[in-house]
Amino acid sequence: MSDAPRVALTFDVEFADRPTHAVATPAILDALEAAGVRSTMFLQGRWAEAEPVVARRIAQDGHVIGNHSHHHARMTMLTGAGITRDVRAADAAIEAATGASPRPWFRCPFGAGARTLRVVRRLADAGYVDVAWHVDPGDWTGVSAKVLRRRVVDSIGPDTRRPSEAGSPDRADDTRAPLGGVLFADVARWAW
Ligand SMILES: [Zn+2]
């Protein structure tokens, strides 16, 4: 393994809490495909149920599939049994939609519970390990493409994982612009 910088691009694909454009996730997939970059996409179970065609394309495009819970509730707000139920429901929904198992990759909604022992243990019992991130570019907050690009590229270093909210589609244009442009040119050299 070389010492060159490497970056893992990750996206959370979920129902946004604001009005959405159905084309957003496919647009991001198009940009990734054009750049020849594969990412890891953490799917919300309910989203995968509602968007099976897009969900299947994510797997067919060669992206790694992860589990982003079923209801996108904070794991810390659920009982132990509730965590297991939610994770398993998402597991089944994601595999049914994509044809791929999301195990062992899980991303806690909001990152809540990633360092909480009872949550981590429940995830482990269900065959999962939480995957956090190092750089949150905040694309879901409506920052411009220019700011988004700077945040990501300037933050890249060893062991950087980049999350993005592919399910916040009203930000799709801002997200897609750097994805299809300079950002991927920069990142693709390091992606694997
Ligand atoms: Zn999320």
Image: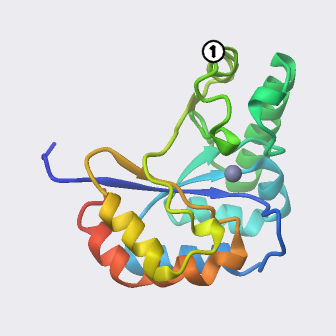
User: Closer to the camera, 191 or 60?
Assistant: 191
Q: Quadrant of the C terminus?
A: bottom left
The verdict on label 1 being within 8 Å of ligand 1 is no
Is residue 37 something one can see in this rendering?
A: no
Amino acid bearing label 1: Leu
For residue 147, side relative to residue 89 (left or right): left
Task: Identify whether 172 is placed above or below 63.
Answer: below
Front residue of 135/167: it is 135
Crowd rating for badge 1 (residues with CA inside 10 Å; few <14, some 14–19, many 20+):
few
Give the residue displayed 58% in from the left and 24% down from the top.
115
User: What colour scheme does the image use?
Assistant: rainbow
Location of residue 127 (image quadrant): top right
Q: Position of residue 40 (x, y in %)?
A: 51, 53
Q: At which x and y percent is residue 189?
A: 23, 67
Q: Is residue 93 left or right of residue 192?
A: right
In screen coordinates, is 65 left or right of 23? left
Location of residue 149 in the rendering, given as x and y in whole percent from the top left corner: 41, 74
Query: Is 158 located above or below residue 186 in the figure?
Result: above
User: Which quarter of the rendered picture does the N terminus lie within?
Assistant: top left
Q: Number of callouts in the render?
A: 1
Q: Residue at x 71, y 46 (%)?
A: 95
List x then y, in percent, for residue 109. 70, 43
Residue that label 1 marks? 117
Residue 164: quadrant of the picture: bottom right
Query: In the figure, 52 relative to 44: above or below?
Result: below
Is residue 52 among what the camera can see? yes
